[in-house]
């Protein structure tokens, strides 16, 4: 059995919208990842089965390794189909905002969503949710938004309406946002949900292969290049990897090629925190990804130094400046957080006995 973490009043409120609404739009954050697409398509399958006119709209395209997901071909990219997307958003009865906490995370879509008279519900697991929705289902202690979508559907009494296709999408979101269940996944209820999804007939091993084992040769060579230029700050138990726009072009970079790179330095013994800096190919900024182990709060580092945030062990941010300036910013950050890094290292040593 699952703990009823979502307030019953919010379940009842959304159920009324579900009864009355006909047109639903599901939106997720810019550069959508596995959880954004998995939760969105999982909810889309459910709403479609209820006879609703549902559409998924993302600010831009998602990585190729997610295009196998059932329903993914119907996702609208706002940057490519703005006029059609604006019409759907304006005419929606309900807008479901998934996997983001503040309206700026949906980039150019923000104005259209805010201007729409539609009722709005936020379903998310990031800290500090904004107040742009009437219903806010925010649980930062939950590993993924896809898990929250599963919980919501079940609390509506509709577990039987979760199809195999919906289950595949939800599982993908849960799997990708926990790094294949290697972090933020110690809650036993996560695995109860996985077992329920398996009962729908999904093949979790095949899903893993579709997501993680379908990269190009160029991507593998890029990975080797990035790791060969990695810098380890041994006194701070951290590692830094980076990728300039020129380097991306050299390796024929496509969206999603660097997915998971930030996790790799954590496999080094004694490394507590990993940082990946990548020059954005669409905007004049550097995207910052941070991962950590144990109790080190990389989300605090992201918030203080990179205008970002996220979860304890997985967070991100942005930096406006040159790559060298971004690297210096990271060095300043780990110097300030050195006491926490050293304390976490000692904890890790103690755990090993």
Image (cartoon, grey):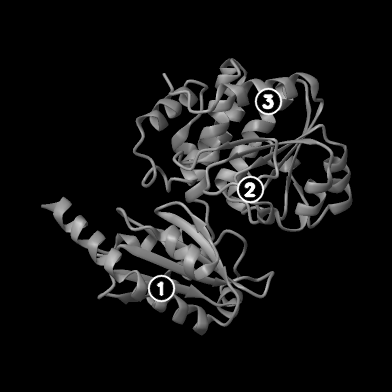
Alpha-carbon neighbours of circle 3 within 10 Å: few (<14), some, or many (≥20)? many
Instruction: Kindly identify which residue carries mark 2.
Output: 130
Q: Is residue 258 visible?
A: no
Q: Which residue is drawn at the image coordinates 31% and 76% (left, top)?
A: 233
Q: Position of residue 44 (x, y in %)?
A: 69, 32
Q: Position of residue 15 (x, y in %)?
A: 68, 21
Label 3 SS: helix
Cα distance between the residues tagged 1 and 2: 27 Å
* Crowd around label 1: few <14 · some 14–19 · many ≥20 (10 Å): some
Please say if 58 is above or below 343: above
- Residue 109 placed where, x, y %? 77, 53
Q: Which of marks 2 and 1 precedes in the sequence?
A: 2
Mark before the other along the chain sequence, 1 or 3: 3
Q: Quadrant of residue 270?
A: bottom left
**Residue denoted by label 3:** 14
As drawn, 15 above or below 112? above
Mark seen at residue 261? none
In the drawing, what numbered circle is on residue 333? 1
Sequence-wise, the earlier of marks 2 and 3 is: 3
Side of 91 where 136 appears, left or right: left
Instruction: Identify the residue shown where x is 62% and y is 33%.
Output: 42
Taking the spot 23% from the left edge, 62% from the top edge, the residue there is: 343
Q: CA distance from mark 2 to mark 3?
A: 18 Å
Q: Is residue 120 visible?
A: yes
């Amino acid at each position: 059995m699952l703990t009823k973490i979502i307030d019953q009043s919010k379940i009842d409120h959304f159920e009324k919208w579900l009864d009355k609404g006909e047109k639903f739009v599901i939106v997720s954050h810019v550069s959508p990842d596995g959880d954004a697409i998995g939760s969105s398509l999982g909810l889309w399958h459910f709403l479609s089965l209820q006879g609703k006119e549902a559409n998924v709209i993302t600010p831009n395209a998602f990585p190729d390794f997610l295009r196998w997901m059932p329903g993914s071909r119907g996702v609208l990219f706002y940057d490519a189909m703005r006029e059609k997307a604006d019409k759907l958003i304006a005419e929606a009865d309900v807008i479901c905002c998934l996997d983001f906490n503040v309206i700026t995370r949906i980039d150019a879509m923000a104005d259209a969503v805010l201007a729409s008279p539609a009722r709005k519900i936020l379903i998310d697991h990031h800290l500090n949710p904004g107040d742009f929705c009437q219903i806010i289902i925010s649980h930062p202690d939950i590993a993924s938004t896809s898990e929250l979508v599963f919980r919501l559907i079940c609390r509506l009494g509709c577990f039987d309406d979760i199809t195999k296709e919906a289950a595949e999408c939800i599982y993908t979101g849960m799997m990708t946002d926990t790094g294949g269940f290697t972090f933020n996944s110690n809650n036993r209820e996560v695995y109860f949900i996985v077992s329920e999804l398996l009962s729908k007939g999904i093949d979790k091993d095949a899903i893993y292969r579709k997501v993680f084992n379908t990269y190009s040769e160029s991507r593998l060579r890029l990975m080797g290049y990035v790791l060969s230029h990695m810098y380890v700050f041994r006194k701070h138990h951290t590692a830094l990897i980076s990728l300039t726009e020129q380097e991306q072009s050299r390796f024929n970079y496509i969206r999603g090629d660097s997915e998971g790179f930030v996790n790799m330095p954590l496999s080094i013994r004694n490394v507590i925190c990993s940082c990946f800096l990548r020059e954005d190919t669409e905007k004049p900024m550097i995207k910052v990804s941070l991962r950590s182990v144990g109790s080190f709060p990389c989300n605090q580092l992201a918030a203080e130094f990179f205008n970002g945030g996220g979860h304890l062990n997985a967070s991100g941010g942005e930096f406006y400046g040159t790559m060298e300036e971004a690297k210096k910013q990271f060095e300043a950050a780990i110097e300030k957080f050195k006491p926490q890094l050293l304390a976490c290292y000692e904890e890790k040593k103690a755990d090993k006995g």
